[in-house]
Amino acid sequence: MKVSDRIILLQETLKNEHIDYYMIPTSDFHNSEYVSGYFKIREYFSGFTGSNGTLVISHDHAGLWTDGRYFVQAQKELEGSGIELFCMFEKGVLSIKEYLEQNMDDGEVLGFDGRVVTASYALNLEKALCNKNIKFKYDMDIAGGLWEKRPAIPASPIMILSEEICGQNVGEKLTLIREEMKKHQCSAHLLTKLDDLMWLFNIRGKDIECNPVAFSYGYITMTDAYLFVQKQAVSDDLKQYADKWKITLNDYDEIEEFLENVTVQGRILMDEKSVNCRLYGIVKDSAKIINAPNPSEKLKAIKNPVELEHMEKVYLKDSVAVTRFIYWLKKNIGKTPLNEYSASMHMDELRREIDGFLDLSFPTIGAYKENAAMMHYEATEAVNKELKPEGMFLVDSGGQYMGGTTDVTRTIVLGEISDIIKKHFTAVAVGMLRLSDAKFLYGCTGRNLDILARGPVWDMGIDYKCGTGHGIGYILNVHEGPQNIRWRYAEDAKEAVIEEGMVMSNEPGVYKEGSHGIRIENVIVAKNSEKNDDGQFMHFDTLTYVPIDLDGIDISVMQPKDIERLNDYHKKVYDKVSSYLNDEERDWLREVTRMIGASDKL
Amino acid sequence: MKVSDRIILLQETLKNEHIDYYMIPTSDFHNSEYVSGYFKIREYFSGFTGSNGTLVISHDHAGLWTDGRYFVQAQKELEGSGIELFCMFEKGVLSIKEYLEQNMDDGEVLGFDGRVVTASYALNLEKALCNKNIKFKYDMDIAGGLWEKRPAIPASPIMILSEEICGQNVGEKLTLIREEMKKHQCSAHLLTKLDDLMWLFNIRGKDIECNPVAFSYGYITMTDAYLFVQKQAVSDDLKQYADKWKITLNDYDEIEEFLENVTVQGRILMDEKSVNCRLYGIVKDSAKIINAPNPSEKLKAIKNPVELEHMEKVYLKDSVAVTRFIYWLKKNIGKTPLNEYSASMHMDELRREIDGFLDLSFPTIGAYKENAAMMHYEATEAVNKELKPEGMFLVDSGGQYMGGTTDVTRTIVLGEISDIIKKHFTAVAVGMLRLSDAKFLYGCTGRNLDILARGPVWDMGIDYKCGTGHGIGYILNVHEGPQNIRWRYAEDAKEAVIEEGMVMSNEPGVYKEGSHGIRIENVIVAKNSEKNDDGQFMHFDTLTYVPIDLDGIDISVMQPKDIERLNDYHKKVYDKVSSYLNDEERDWLREVTRMIGASDKL
């Protein structure tokens, strides 16, 4: 069935159900950023494959909202579907809320599956539409019911991580959570965010592609801890582990029933930004809800020394693989037939060989020439571009290892590139290195620092329509909060102060639709520098050590300090990586990490 | 009477009045930043002369809270008073709110004069203390009643500005205000902020030193405008002017009575951050209050083309005076006896000679050597430091002219300075020039940009404990909102997006207690650059053209781009200023604005 036919079928069902507008976000019961097949309803009804997007369907219209990473891709994928694209956050483009405010008539009905919409989103929408007497119907998964051959919810076996890997056992972590609950004067805490649950219980799953999480819920009191997981995911080891730590294992499907019957003594802590509105609805009548970020969010973001030690090792191995990939690509380009997909597969193979490899941390982005202008492009075996000894190939990739999650991007020059592209490349490299070299006072958020990376790109009258960096999980999701590096925030967004031990990506870029895309991404970790009367100074250490392609550098537009930063970085790359390479690779690495000077012609 | 005796007297009165804690902020009925003599009660009871500070007195304790600009000065001035200094915003130092929360006992009484405390401050305090059943008593000026020989409230004649000077008449401005009132669905607007009132009615006063404002209130409806001013301030011209624009003139003292009797049709707009709690209390029972910034705040901050044209001219004249001052100082140092005070007086004289001069925009800060570490130091004829041909002299000064308000700081090298001081000086100059040269997207606030100026100072492990820049009025207060350039904000502070036409200071610094202080300050105005698919880019134009002392520059720590920025700036200084100088001064200016290169020894 074509996408347009699926929409017509849905519209007919909506009419029968007396629903005027129906909203299909991209989410699961846990507000996960990436979702497993069962939850890809928006993709089924729109054909748009990006990781973020919301479809709103009325009886005679369908609109898709997505963010700057996907404008180009969505435009392509929506062709012929009849769906109107709404470019989120662009000037003059209605938000979903504004669209509904302007288009819904008094007394109409808005439908959605309440399990895949967060409480805060629904409450917000309710407020915005309150003047219009809009009815919300969210107890049915209407779109899901029309999906033929819908995949099942995955239930992979749950893995238990050792204390040697985690640095803290679940008992210690529960103590920290309970301390935070006390600060909020709460006696209970409902935790539904999957990566927070994995972190807290020192377990991992495989239920979402590239995200080592298991579908689960948690309910914590001052004395007890309940973990709700799928029956099929539970091994004897997990039962013993739960016994040891006095964790009650319940069935995943029983969470609603449990919440209906449990008696909360006092107040319950939950994050309305991640708890879905079905669960929120159950709890709100029986207990006083304290809406605050999950305490685990910040605790998880601040990596402990054991985690950081493992990450350093893992990042080095990962850097070696990416370095070897670049060597392989540079050597074979123009000689062996290569395309975006086959090259990406080779990158994945090199990574799979690494000791402790578990999975990719996201599907590798291998994008050639103008395809790299799509920030989250993914080539397939069927549709991809042949690589030639010209232009640039952007590879954004990462792995899940027993010891850390990686994320790295290099843009590799395959042959001739124009002077203007070199200037773009150089600005991106300079920005990335300036942010890595930042010195700042404790108290800064990503908003204070973003311009260090973005400035060189802004100076050319260019912007990249995304943040400069995101937090990175530990054997967990490649995107995590609360910290990030952006220059602007949604009105109600809380900005997180950068704390020692927080790990972030640093990935400025230039994206020119139809022409080229450049992104250079290292991962950095915040560390304390000196403390004096003026405060606690901080800096970043770098975890990623992969050469930055000197073929893309126009030294004439660099300041000596920027050249020094690049040389210093390359010296470290050589020092750390070279011993893991064969002679041929090492000779090459020596050449591509050579010191450059103002007098060099590159 | 000594300060300590004044406090004892006040404490006795508090006991008699059954008040346990009494708060004396530094404010007037309009929450003005600077206050005229009548309102300097905090100074009378503490001896601390800084422009910001709050005294809290209980039966057995007195504490003074002030901000980073004044820590050094306050410590000095409080000596022997028995008053404890609380350094605001420093780690581990209680805020006033926290202090009261921790120290006040259940059921105690907190007193203050409700006319000098804003509604938002009082509401906030009420919330914080609500668990303790604290009673607020704010209908009496108890401290004021004990003040012997208290000065009167000034009432200088009100001046009317021409349309040629303002670029917009009061009718046009009222239309803009009423449009904003409509957006808030308000039919009335109570305006109590003095500079906003001056801007709106195109009038000026002289009631606060250096701030050309008249004590006044405004009440605007969709059809009427009421201006409350002191009888003695009203001339026949003002009466005619009011008639012409259909403005009803009322007596300043009648505002409370007026508000008690007026009937608000619907909702009233007022800024709880500037309306005092006495007036708030009168209005709140009779009308629905919409709390939002005064519409005039942003309208006033965005200078119109006529204002900007006048400012450019005025800033050039002002720059010439400062340049001539530097020449004079450099020529006479070591030859003529000079001290901080006499040198500052000479600066003021040069400014007074300028066509259109009305007043200083703040008392000139002339601070030598370690005195410059006090950000707002003011030398007096009695207490000052002799200038010698060594170290540095910081001069921060500005004027009120018919055509603009200026603010400029230069730190002038009088002789030998250490290498480390040169590095500090250079970092400050580099930071100031980098911020002036920023290119950024519309949507940025000062928080995004602050690090451009502060970064070079942070790189040395040093911070300056104040913002980098503040908005500047037009023939008005030298500090105005809503925009500013800071790296962090109070929790509830709104950050203003930088709009084309906003004028700001750019004044990074280094302050080393007991050693030296450096500040270099230009005034900049935000302008639109190119607009493209990525958004509206912006940049700053500079209004100030005064040489930056090359004797303080260590070129070895500058990047070529920073040297280029300094050279470009100095070329413009020479081109703009030289024709207003005599031959001797011009020869000197040519020398001190000479291009410098990496090979130069300075």
Image (spheres, coloured by chain):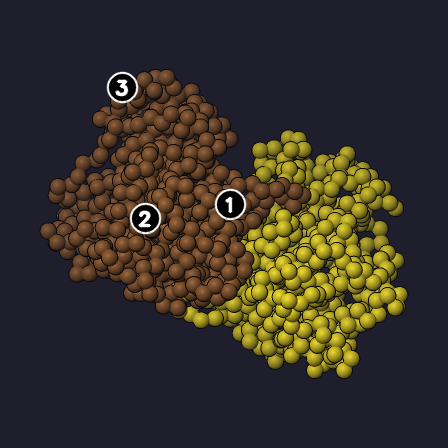
Chain colours: A brown, B yellow
Q: Secondary structure at mark 1?
A: strand
* Outermost residue toward the front in this view: A583
Dot label at residue A540: 1
Residue under the point 50% across and 58% down: A563
Tell me the amino acid under the disc marked 3. Asp
Which sits earlier in the primary sequence, circle 2 or circle 3?
Answer: 3
Q: Mark 3: which secondary structure?
A: helix
Residue A68 % position (x, y): 34, 57
Say the numbered circle drawn on residue A325: 2
First along the sequence among labels 2 and 1: 2
Q: Three-letter amino acid code at disc 2?
A: Phe
In the figure, is residue B247 to the left or right of B398? left
Q: Tell me the chain of label 3.
A: A
Point out residue B440 in the picture as x, y percentages from the top left corner: 48, 63
Q: Residue A85: name its quadrant.
A: bottom left
Chain label for disc 2: A
| Foreground residue among B553 and A251 | B553
Q: Residue at x 71, y 69 (%)?
A: B399
Vertical placement of residue A278 versus A63, above or below: above
The residue that mark 3 highlights is: A236
Viewer-nearest residue: B554 or B356:
B554
- What is the three-letter code of the residue carrying label 1? Phe
